[in-house]
Image (tube, rainbow, N blue to C red):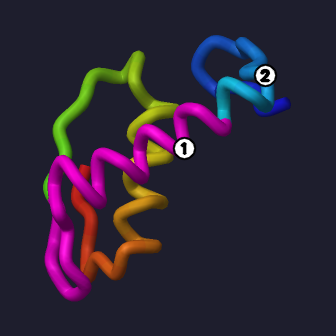
Amino acid sequence: MTSTPITGYTIPEDLKQQIEGYASLVIQVGVNLQPGQCLNLRAELEHAEFVRAVVSAAYRAGAKFVAV
């Protein structure tokens, strides 16, 4: 399990896998990020875990730079 630094809440592994899967779907289908492209994100602090997953998915998809 992963503990969030903001709230100390522990995220169950199955939920973490769902978040990572959704983040990959957002990058591949929703954003259609292509290798070498940059990505700009804006998010609320409460969405930190999801944003981390999206950033990770973007770099795995070949993003040149991700700004949050």
Identify which residue is drawn at 29% across, 55% down. 27
Label 2 sits on a secondary structure element that is loop
Q: Is residue 16 above or below residue 30?
A: above
Farthest right residue in view: 1
Q: Is residue 38 magenta?
A: yes
Q: CA distance from mark 2 to mark 1?
A: 12 Å
Identify which residue is drawn at 59% across, 32% down. 18
Q: Earlier in the sequence, mark 2 or mark 1?
A: 2
Q: Which residues are magenta?
A: 17-39
Answer with left or right where residue 52 lies relative to residue 39.
right
The residue that disc 2 covers is 12
Q: Is residue 64 above or below residue 6?
A: below
The residue that disc 1 covers is 20
Identify which residue is drawn at 19% across, 78% down. 34
Q: Is residue 2 above or below residue 66?
A: above
Identify which residue is drawn at 78% across, 22% down. 12
- Front-lying residue, 3 or 36: 36
